Amino acid sequence: MRLEGKHIVITGASSGIGEQIAYEVARQKAIPILVARNKEKLANMAKQIETAYHVSCRYYCLDVSDMAAVETVFQQIFNDIKTIDVLVNNAGFGVFRNVEEIDLQEMKDMFEVNVFGLIACTKMVYPHMIKRGSGHIINIASQAGKIATPKSSVYSATKHAVLGFTNSLRMEAAQHGVFVTTVNPGPIQTNFFTIADASGDYVKNVERWMLSPEHVARRVVEVMMTPTREVNMPIWMNLGSKMYQLFPTLVERLGKNAFFKK
């Protein structure tokens, strides 16, 4: 019961792996703190968690791309619970388009949510963790941050940014006893693709290899409050990213057909 009584803040908690992480930490008798834009869904989740797992569950409505709102909401969280033991930066979205078709507002929105919002939430929590000499920041990145593929240029760029930020933060945080972990999943069976892949073609092509959100959530919760550098899923895709770092031209040539499945 390593997590019993710990306060776990989860952004993007109203769906997908964020929702499943909330249920999983509640099973571990931790106290989930739900953060997302959908107030009605958060309220229903909180009620369900308290009834099913007999732990308290707070929720806060927040669009992480709103910097002023991030500050206000996290100040309220600290007023309410005093301590945040784990922050899971899960909020994010993607849109798959060829570069010539990229909508510049969508580009801006992706960076504001996936990168700037993640950094803003981290900055609200991290100083408190430094002061206590403990805590864990978990950033949900993507295998797309390691291998950029066609039609995901902007999305991959945001996840590259998350990896770069997290790798630097990890070294800084280690001096203060704070753990920092990146989670790099491949495609997951969530509503992420409702926006990212409106045509449905990509999902049809990769459906057999998609991860379940419950499986990803369990892996995330397993590493909480441990000095785990990265969680990479699935293993075969991570092996591909390692090969790409060593032999990028070869991997791009051999993997061309797979890369164009979007």
Image (cartoon, helix red, strand yellow):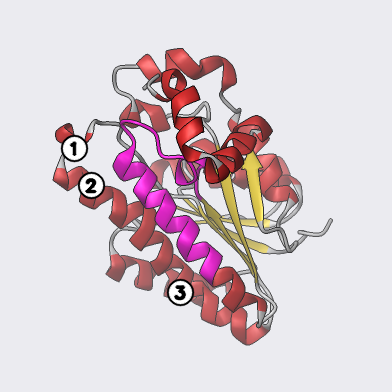
Left or right for 34, reference 151: right
Label 2 or label 1, whichever comes before in sequence order: 1
Q: What stretch is highlighted in magenta?
A: 141-168
Q: Is residue 126 above or below residue 221?
A: below
Residue designated by label 1:
102
The reply to whether residue 38 is visible in this rendering is: no
Q: Quadrant of residue 115?
A: bottom left
Label 3 or label 1, whichever comes before in sequence order: 1
Q: What secondary structure is marked by label 3? A: helix
Please say if the residues under marks 3 and 2 sit with CB atoms less than 8 Å apart. Answer: no
Q: What residue type is labelled 3?
A: Met
Quadrant for the C terminus, please: top left
Secondary structure mainly formed by the magenta segment: helix
Please say if the residues under marks 2 and 1 sit with CB atoms less than 8 Å apart. Answer: yes
Residue designated by label 2:
107
Residue 146 picture location, percent across and down: 49, 45
